[in-house]
Image (tube, rainbow, N blue to C red):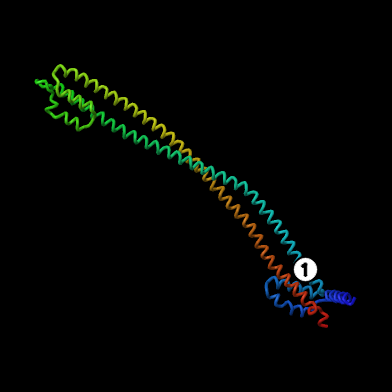
């Protein structure tokens, strides 16, 4: 019973203190250092001083400080709701851009690979054509040597000696033909021609003439085939060049579009970061003020007896 009475007495005394008007000199002494600690502290000190000069009670001072604390808490909740909604809205808008940038990146990669494939195809065709040209020039040189050799053999057959021998042996033509290494059939013809009489020479001339025509026909067919190869090479090269030009143009368009959208995405992401940073900055500033408000509450509650006017009466 005694304990209950003491509690009631304490409660009444506490209420009585809160209903007392504040003593301004005492308040200035208690809150002097607080006022110097920050701009906000000085501002709050000024507000509370104005209340005291108007005859405010300690309860009014406490209510004002508590109202500030609640206002800061409500302001923080509203800020977080507003900025979070804004951030979510920006992120939602960015998602479409993220997908578009990814699709463009894949399209650019595909276009780049197509250009690479076309270049590889052209390189293969160039190599094949170069090999064909080299082979053709080699065949042409061989056939021309054969024609020259046949011409020499015909010339020697026409110049049969009266002894029934051609001039092949005398001019060492057989050795020259062997050194040329242009086929065993020519060596055999040269050997036969080396020991002919006049009647046999006529048959050999016909044979050499047929061989000459066959070589010329082979040259003509080879030339026609080579011209067809050149035509085909030029056609394929033209088609690849056209495709390559179109692929490069398409690639450049895609790449430019990708760069533009990627930049827009970067700007958008930076915007999202700025919203978050702005909220963080506001929270930091508000937290500083909230800490000062709590500090003021603590000072007020710890010094109620000292600040109450009755303590000075």
| Viewer-closest of 225 and 189 | 189
Residue 137 lies, in percent from the top left, at 29, 33
Residue sitting at 30 percent across and 25 percent down? 220
Does residue 105 lie above or below 291 as drawn? above
In which quadrant will I find the N terminus? bottom right
Does residue 231 lie above or below 100 as drawn? above
As drawn, the residue found furthest toward the bottom would be 313
Q: Which residue is mark 1?
A: 66
| Viewer-closest of 222 and 255 | 222
Residue 63 lies, in percent from the top left, at 80, 69
As drawn, the residue found furthest toward the right would be 1
Residue 105 lies, in percent from the top left, at 54, 45
| Viewer-closest of 123 and 98 | 123
Q: Quadrant of residue 129?
A: top left
Residue 89 lies, in percent from the top left, at 67, 51
Does residue 43 lie above or below 247 as drawn? below
């Amino acid at each position: 019973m005694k304990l209950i009475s003491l509690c009631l007495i304490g409660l009444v005394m506490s209420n009585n203190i809160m209903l007392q008007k504040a003593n301004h000199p005492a308040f200035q002494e208690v809150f002097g250092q607080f006022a110097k600690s920050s701009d906000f502290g000085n501002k709050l000190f000024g507000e509370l001083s104005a209340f005291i000069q108007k005859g405010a009670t300690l309860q009014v001072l406490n209510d004002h400080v508590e109202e500030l604390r609640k206002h800061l808490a409500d302001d923080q909740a509203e800020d977080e709701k507003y900025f979070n909604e804004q951030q979510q809205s920006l992120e939602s808008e960015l998602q479409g851009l993220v997908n578009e940038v990814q699709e463009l990146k894949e399209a650019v990669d595909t276009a780049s690979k197509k250009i690479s494939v076309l270049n590889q195809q052209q390189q293969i065709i160039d190599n094949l054509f170069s090999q064909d040209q080299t082979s053709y020039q080699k065949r042409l040189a061989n056939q021309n040597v054969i024609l020259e050799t046949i011409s020499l053999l015909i010339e020697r057959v026409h110049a049969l000696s009266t002894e029934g021998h051609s001039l092949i042996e005398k001019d060492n033509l057989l050795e020259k033909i062997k050194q040329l290494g242009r086929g065993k059939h020519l060596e055999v013809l040269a050997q036969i021609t080396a020991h002919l009489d006049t009647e046999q020479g006529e048959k050999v001339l016909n044979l050499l003439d047929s061989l000459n025509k066959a070589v010329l026909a082979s040259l003509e067919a080879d030339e026609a085939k080579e011209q067809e190869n050149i035509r085909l090479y030029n056609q394929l090269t033209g088609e690849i060049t056209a495709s390559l030009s179109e692929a490069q143009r398409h690639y450049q368009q895609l790449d430019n579009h990708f760069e533009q959208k990627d930049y827009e995405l970067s700007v958008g992401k930076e915007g999202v970061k700025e919203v978050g940073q702005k909220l963080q900055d506001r929270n930091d500033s508000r937290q500083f003020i909230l800490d000062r408000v709590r500090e003021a509450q603590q000072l007020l509650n710890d010094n109620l007896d000292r600040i109450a006017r009755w303590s000075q009466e």
